[in-house]
Amino acid sequence: MLTALSVCTVMSQDASAATSTTFSTRAVVVPTCSIGTPGNLAFGAPTQQIGGGNIKITANVDVTASVAITCTPQSPYSVYSVPSGNATGSGDSAVRRMKLSSGAFYIPYSISTASAGGTAIGTTSSSSNRYTATGTGSAQTMTYYGRVPANSYVQDVGGATANTPNGGSYSDTFTFTVSY
């Protein structure tokens, strides 16, 4: 007699396998800056001497104003100011001038960020005499100084002493640019 025996074996193995990879995440915080509205430089009525058909400013006229600048924390920034079309010369040696509202006469002036009559603020992003600071994330005040220098004369279009200049209101505009 033959007897058959059948055995069934079931083996269980872990059918899953694992593999892994590493990846990175990134975020870039782009530095940014904003600038408020600059205060006006109001020179008023300079002390003047009239004679020989010329008008001479006899004493320095110094004024101060400020503007708020807000930049991302730890972001270095610089400020420069391009002269208007009333200026004579170019680049950092340009002479800023206020123009008579009803004529072609000018009064020279300067803008500095160190002191009245100090080195004029740079006129390009590469000027060595730009105002520089580092952002804090809060508004920072940049004070600037304007000066109409003593012993300067009302000028004609070319920058020469004007003969028989007119009295009246002289003005100019300027723009501060923040580079960061």
Image (tube, rainbow, N blue to C red):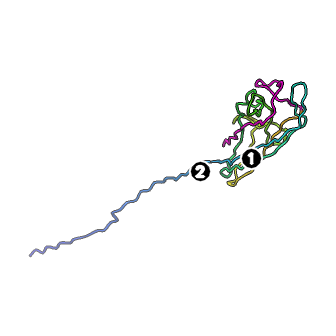
- Give the farthest residue toward the left: 1
Q: Is residue 175 within the magenta segment? A: yes
The vertical placement of 110 against 1, above or below, is above
* Contact, mark 2 vs mark 1 (Cβ under 8 Å): no
Three-letter amino acid code at the position of disc 2 = Val
Mark 2 burial class by Cα count in 10 Å: few <14, some 14-19, many 20+: few
What span is colored magenta in the figure?
151-180
Nearest to the eye among marks 2 and 1: give it. Answer: 1
Q: Left or right? Give the position of 23 relative to 10.
A: right
Residue 18's tag is: none
> Magenta region's main secondary structure?
loop
Residue 108 painted magenta: no
Tally of marks: 2
Circle 2 residue: 29
Q: Considering only order in the chain, which callout, 1 or 2, is on the residue closer to the N terminus?
A: 2
User: Label 1's element?
Assistant: loop
Residue 126 appears in view = no
Q: Residue at x 75, y 42 (%)?
A: 131
Name the residue beneath numbered marker 1.
39
